């Protein structure tokens, strides 16, 4: 099971166009805001064990994950796409987390999923603006509802 979970909401994205929702990219201002904020935000992260970087398959989430990878010193080629993050499949996501053999997972996705996961795991209502990052640990060693602890929440 994962030891430390870091939830990340994608940055400011373009409006939906004819290519559909999955193709929406970050705006240039959205990229710039993340490139400015993430080195500072992720400098406070103390990963536990191996670090895995997961992303929704949406272009805006994948680009956000690339900026996070740069700030974390992770190869962007190591980003793993998880459909559960786009589909907002909470049970599927928790199941995927339970298969992780310890360590840290940084997961980039969308709202309301990110906000819902903080509430489900920690029992807290957390605002999740664009680019927001939340770190969660599991002191009980369980992924059960209300068993995790929100360590910090930082806005980009």
Image (cartoon, grey):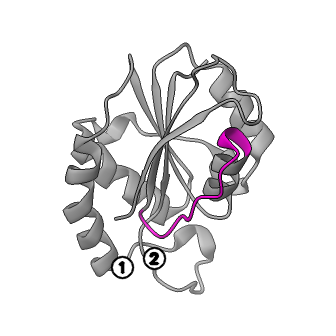
- Determine the residue positioned at 42% across, 75% down: 12
Q: Which residues are magenta?
A: 120-131
CA neighbours of label 1 inside 10 A, class few (<14), some (14 to 19), many (20+):
some
Q: CA distance from mark 2 to mark 1?
A: 5 Å
**x and y percentages locating residue 8 in the rendered image:** 47, 52
Task: Specify the farthest residue to the top.
Answer: 101
Residue 155 is left or right of residue 70, and the answer is: right
Q: Which SS type dominates the magenta stretch? A: loop
Residue at x-position 57% and y-position 35%: 149
Q: Quadrant of residue 87?
A: bottom right
Residue 99 position by quadrant: top right
Label 2 sits on a secondary structure element that is: loop
Q: Give residue 13's mark.
A: 2
Q: Are marks 2 and 1 in contact (CB under 8 Å)?
A: yes
Q: Nearer the viewer, residue 117 or 107?
A: 117
Q: Is residue 66 shown above or below 127? A: above
Residue 63 inside the magenta-drawn segment = no
């Amino acid at each position: 099971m994962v030891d430390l979970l870091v939830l990340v909401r994608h940055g400011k994205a373009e409006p939906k166009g004819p290519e559909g929702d999955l193709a929406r990219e970050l705006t240039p201002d959205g990229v710039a805001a993340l490139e400015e904020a993430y080195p500072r935000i992720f400098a406070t992260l103390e990963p536990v064990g191996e670090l895995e970087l997961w992303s929704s398959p949406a272009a805006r989430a994948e680009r956000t994950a690339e900026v996070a990878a740069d700030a974390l010193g992770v190869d962007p080629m190591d980003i793993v796409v998880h459909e559960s993050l786009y589909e907002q499949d909470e049970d599927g996501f928790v199941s995927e987390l339970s298969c992780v053999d310890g360590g840290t997972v940084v997961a980039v996705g969308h709202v309301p999923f990110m906000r819902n996961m903080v509430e489900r795991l920690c029992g807290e209502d957390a605002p999740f603006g664009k680019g927001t990052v939340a770190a969660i640990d599991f002191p009980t060693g369980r992924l059960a509802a209300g068993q995790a602890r929100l360590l910090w929440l930082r806005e980009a």
